[in-house]
Image: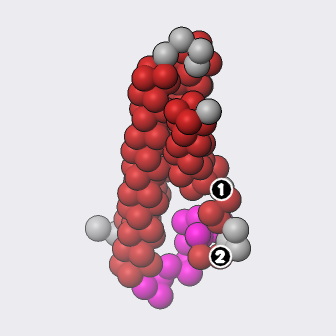
Amino acid sequence: MLPHEYDRIIREMIQHESVLTDHRMTWMWALQGLLFTTLGLLWEKSVLATLVVCGLGMISSISVGYSILVSIKATNTLINDWENKLGDNAVQYPRIEALQGHEMRFRYLLPWRLFPFLFPSAWFCLGMLRRFC
């Protein structure tokens, strides 16, 4: 395979991972919105139901967070493969990503890294608030 073909394929694979991450975040936002709405409707009606909704919110957030971490790892693997395969020829091509993770100082504040792990804390706090207050 020629280097320019390999470059194109790797870029397409990374773009696909980015699209998947975008879809996962969209699903997470939609599901979290529905669950928060459900929680608001059930808050005064049933302690058990609110705890179940809080549990679903925690589990779904953690699941999305894990899938995004796997996607980040896949992207990093593709970038490393690209750099290893092209070797010294890599300088002839534009960088795969404008900024890679290790070049960003506060990368953990990016929404796809922060919110899937912030939501479970919020759900836990709401569940404890409902259970004990």
Q: Which residue is labeled 2 in the image? A: 103
What residue appears at the point 68 percent right and 71 percent down from the top-left corner?
104
> Label 2 neighbourhood size at 10 Å, few (<14), some (14-19), many (20+)?
few
Query: In the image, is residue 92 above or below residue 35?
Result: below
Q: Position of residue 47 (x, y in %)?
A: 49, 22
Can residue 96 be seen in this snapshot? yes
What residue type is disc 1 on? Leu
What residue appears at the point 39 percent right and 49 percent down from the top-left corner?
67
Q: Depth check: 56 or 13 in front?
A: 56
- Identify the mark nearer the N-term, 2 or 1: 2
Q: Which residue is labeled 1 in the image? A: 110
Q: Quadrant of residue 109?
A: bottom right
Q: Position of residue 20 (x, y in %)?
A: 45, 42
Q: Position of residue 9 (x, y in %)?
A: 39, 57
Left-right relation of 15 to 78: right
Q: Which residues are magenta?
A: 87-101
Q: CA distance from mark 2 to mark 1?
A: 13 Å
Q: Quadrant of residue 97?
A: bottom right
- The answer to if 95 sits in the magenta stretch is yes
Query: In the image, is residue 60 above or below residue 37?
Result: below
Q: Position of residue 80 (x, y in %)?
A: 42, 75
Asked if the residue at tag 1 contacts the one at tag 2, i.e. Cβ–Cβ closer than 8 Å, the answer is no
